Image (cartoon, rainbow, N blue to C red):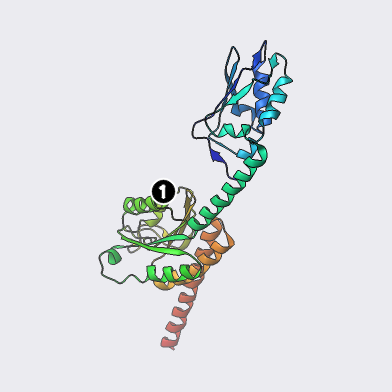
Amino acid sequence: MAEFDLLNKTELRIEQILLQGANLNQVADVVADVFELSRGEVLVTDALNDVLVIDILRQTVNPYQLVGKKSVLFERLAGLPGIGITDKTSICSEGMMGWMTLDETRARLALKRSEMMAEEIRRRVGKKALVFSTGFEVSSGQIVDTNKPTIARRLERAGYSVTLGADLKDDRDHIHDHLRRAVEDEGYGLVITTGGVGAEAKDRTIEALLKLDPEAATPYVCMFEPGTGRHEKDGVRIGVGRASGTLIVALTGPNDEVKRSLEVLVRGLESELVKNELAEEIARNLRAMLRERMKWHVENINKSSA
């Protein structure tokens, strides 16, 4: 069960409770135990006349830890020295903490329904994909973008609803802003980019991904000596990151590499591989493709020189 955000409404008041020499540390111990929280997450902030004010020091809570706990809490508190519980004792909370006062059976049914709705929403969002291409040659119209249609066809066969995004210029912040909007504002479960992952100075897709997810997996497909030819960086990398539940995959640009990567990507999505595993599978496949090309190249050189 996912935890619910308390929306900063973490205060719980127990009203018309009898207090006479009560130990507030013991009260906090009982509250933490009943709600299955750590002791450091419960603080009694005030005790005045017949009111106890308790603050839960966390931002999210599992509602199953709360439902139906009012009677248990009152029973446990009544067993402490210096505390009296009567028929007039009540609990007041403006937020999620109020779940403890609900009928347990009805509350659990409501939670189960909300879980099912949340799962359906996650499933639908997870099947929404957005595809970007990067590079001046694409964004300027110098070449036809074959990558986005290729990706769309393959993902649609896998059950995804695909949107073809903009052609992005080779600029880290520009790419990052489009990725961020796709994650935070547009509700996509999967975002794919092609191009901009090479070793030239203009290639900035991996840097944009790392700005969004500093822990993104970015394995090398091949490596170079920086400064050799146009290679400013030390190699070609692909990337897989995650931000706010959205999976972001940065693929290479050549269409044949995209096609080959897609099969690995779809299998990995179906297997629910974590980002490091998925990234390494894609990179390993591209390395094998590169070795095949080099072998073919050497064989043809040998044939031509024979």
Say whether residue 3 is visible: yes
Tally the marks: 1
Residue at 72% across / 20% down in the picture? 78
Query: Looking at the image, is 240 positioned above or below residue 23?
Result: below
Q: 267 left or right of 147?
A: right
* Residue 123 position in % (x across, y down): 53, 57
Q: Nearer the viewer, residue 243 or 95?
A: 95
Q: 135 left or right of 131?
A: left
Residue at 67% across / 14% down in the picture? 22
Q: Which of 240 and 21 is in front in this view?
A: 21
* Residue with the mark numbered 1: 184
Q: Nearer the viewer, residue 145 or 112?
A: 112
Query: Looking at the image, is 212 positioned above or below residue 281?
Result: above
Q: Nearer the viewer, residue 135 or 105?
A: 105
The quarter of the rendered structure image containing the N terminus is top right
Splitting the image into 4 quarters, where does residue 204 fall? bottom left
User: Looking at this rendering, what residue extends furthest in the bottom direction?
Assistant: 306
Say whether residue 254 is visible: no
Query: Looking at the image, is 259 positioned above or below residue 10?
Result: below
The quarter of the rendered structure image containing the C terminus is bottom left
User: Looking at this rendering, what residue extends furthest in the front direction?
Assistant: 87
* Residue 64 position in % (x across, y down): 64, 39
Residue density around tag 1, few if under 14, some if 14–19, many if 20 or more, within 10 Å: few
* Residue 244 position in % (x across, y down): 47, 48
**SS under mark 1:** helix
* Residue 76 position in % (x across, y down): 72, 24
Amino acid residing under circle 1: Glu
Q: 234 left or right of 75?
A: left
Residue at 62% across / 47% down in the picture? 112
